[in-house]
């Protein structure tokens, strides 16, 4: 069955940081509406750099990212960012105003909502995530889990079609991690996450793309990757213990499984909050 056109189409994307080495080389994959995709690989593989291309925080020097038929460019990036919400690895990149409520209302205000409407949307989103009690606290007075959920709230308040998350379970204790994973399992947005947490990846995703040194080395069902012990060892990945399956997602066809190796340097990832 043909799943239809992809919601996100990454076409031969290459990127080089100014004055630095190549960070991405000819990366291509597609994501269907409703799909949940894990982006895996060792430190420095280019995962965060790739994520930053999905809503135009970075633009490639070669190739293109297409979102629902629209190429991501300087001319289209504002509209693209309304559809693709990016949650950074460090909540401090998204929580910088005096209170959590003001942080969450920031996006609607930028989109032209009145202060009263923006505040109402912020309250609704905080209530939805179970952290409305923290609305009037500053970020440094929040727990790790509250900070993570607060950063997520700054994105969800704008009701994006796609959630892009960079290491959403990092620096959380067991309870906070479990809460974030269960919350993401309950969401219906298309989901793309970069993570070293393969247990969380398996709970959330059915498919994975693996990067190494800026190049895609595998695109396959996640269970298939997790069952390939030599492959996991080669790329520094550790299979999790058995756990519950991820929620269903939109059909995606049969992704290619290629396993080409690449030698070369990889660049670090430097996210900044989107405007």
Image: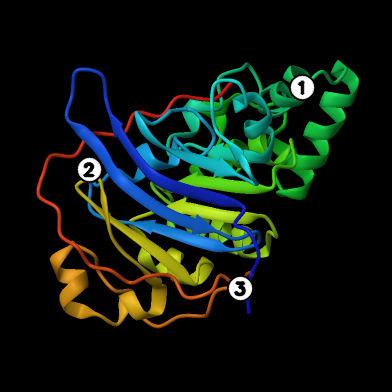
- The spot of residue 261 in percent (x, y) is 15, 59
Q: Are marks 1 and 2 in contact (CB under 8 Å)?
A: no
Query: Which type of secondary structure does the marked residue at label 2 adopt?
Result: loop
135 vs 205: above or below: above
User: Is 102 left or right of 214, judged from the image as shown?
Assistant: right
- The residue under label 3 is 251
Q: Are marks 1 and 3 in contact (CB under 8 Å)?
A: no
139 vs 181: above or below: above
Disc 1/disc 3 C-alpha distance (Å): 33 Å
Q: Characterize the local packing of mark 2: few (<14), some (14-19) or many (20 or more) Cα atoms within 10 angstroms.
A: some
Residue 143 seen in render: no
User: Is 29 left or right of 130, judged from the image as shown?
Assistant: left
Q: Quadrant of residue 223?
A: bottom left
Q: Are marks 2 and 3 in contact (CB under 8 Å)?
A: no
- The residue under label 2 is 44
Q: Which mark is residue 35?
A: none
User: Is 50 left or right of 237, judged from the image as shown?
Assistant: right
- The residue under label 1 is 111
Query: Which type of secondary structure does the marked residue at label 1 adopt?
Result: loop
Of marks 1 and 3, the one in the foreground: 3
């Amino acid at each position: 069955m043909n799943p239809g056109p992809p919601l996100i189409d990454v076409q031969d994307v290459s990127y080089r940081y100014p004055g630095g080495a190549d960070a991405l080389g000819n990366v291509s994959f597609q994501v269907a509406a409703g799909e949940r995709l894990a982006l895996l690989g060792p430190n420095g593989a280019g995962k965060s750099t790739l994520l930053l291309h999905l809503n135009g925080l970075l633009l490639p020097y070669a190739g293109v990212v297409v979102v629902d038929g629209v190429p991501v460019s300087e001319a289209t990036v504002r509209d693209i960012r309304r559809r693709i919400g990016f949650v950074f690895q460090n909540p401090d990149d998204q929580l910088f105003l005096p209170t959590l409520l003001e942080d969450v209302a920031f996006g609607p205000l930028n989109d032209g909502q009145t202060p009263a409407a923006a505040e109402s949307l912020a309250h609704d989103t905080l209530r939805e995530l179970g952290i409305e009690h923290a609305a009037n606290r500053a970020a440094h007075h929040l727990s790790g889990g509250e900070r993570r959920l607060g950063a997520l709230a700054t994105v969800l308040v704008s009701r994006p079609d796609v959630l892009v998350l960079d290491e959403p379970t990092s620096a959380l204790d067991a309870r906070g991690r479990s809460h974030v994973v269960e919350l993401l399992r309950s969401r219906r947005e298309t989901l793309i996450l970069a993570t070293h947490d393969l247990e969380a990846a398996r709970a959330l995703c059915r498919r994975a793309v693996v990067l190494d040194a800026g190049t895609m080395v595998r695109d396959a069902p996640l269970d298939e990757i997790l069952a390939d012990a030599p492959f996991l060892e080669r790329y520094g990945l550790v299979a999790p213990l058995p756990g519950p399956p991820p929620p269903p997602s939109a059909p995606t066809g049969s992704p290619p499984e290629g396993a080409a190796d690449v030698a070369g340097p990889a660049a670090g990832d430097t996210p900044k909050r989107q405007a």
